[in-house]
Amino acid sequence: MTETTDKTPQNPRNVYELMENDAGEVMVLIFAGEDKPVNPTFTLKEKEKLIEITRSKNDIILIEGLQPDTIEKIKNLKTLYVCEMKYNENPEAENEIVNAYAATVKKKAVEPQNELPKAEASQEETLAEKARKARENLLKKNNSNN
């Protein structure tokens, strides 16, 4: 798998290349950010067809325009390798690697569930059952007094 940006970007620094080796590991080549990455992570956003690489708390890079076969490969990754190169105006000059690191997949936030956990649900049923029985007893008493 080798994928590059489809469109000519307005800023030539917004270019990326994705590559896969024989072991199925995927690396993205990008131009370096200003700061060193701190605890880098990545998230695949399938609907948006992009990878979000979080270099640090306030530094996020978007790799957009992913092809369907690339998305399928990235869905199964736990690690995305990132190679950041120094931007050079001269296309003939050799690119210098500034940062190379492994970004781990960011765990998805667990969505809140509307259902009660089983322990709470059984307790809820017990309370509902008790209320039903108390109501029945009250109705019986009222009927027997009439």
Image: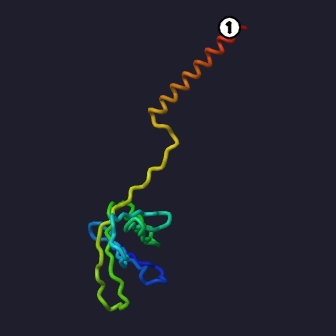
On screen, 10 above or below 71? Answer: below
Dot 1 corresponds to which residue?
A: 144
On-image quarter of the C terminus: top right
Front residue of this view, candidates 114 and 58? 58
Q: Residue at x 43, y 79 (%)?
A: 14
On screen, 135 above or below 141? Answer: below
Percent coordinates x, y for residue 105 in the rendering: 36, 60
> SS at mark 1?
helix
Q: Is residue 112 left or right of residue 104?
A: right
Identify residue type, mark 1: Ser
Q: Check disc 1: other Cα within 10 Å, few if <14, some if 14-19, many if 20+.
A: few
On screen, 142 above or below 25? Answer: above
Percent coordinates x, y for residue 10 in the rendering: 49, 83
On-image quarter of the N terminus: bottom left
Q: Residue at x 42, y 63 (%)?
A: 44
Percent coordinates x, y for residue 120 in the rendering: 47, 33
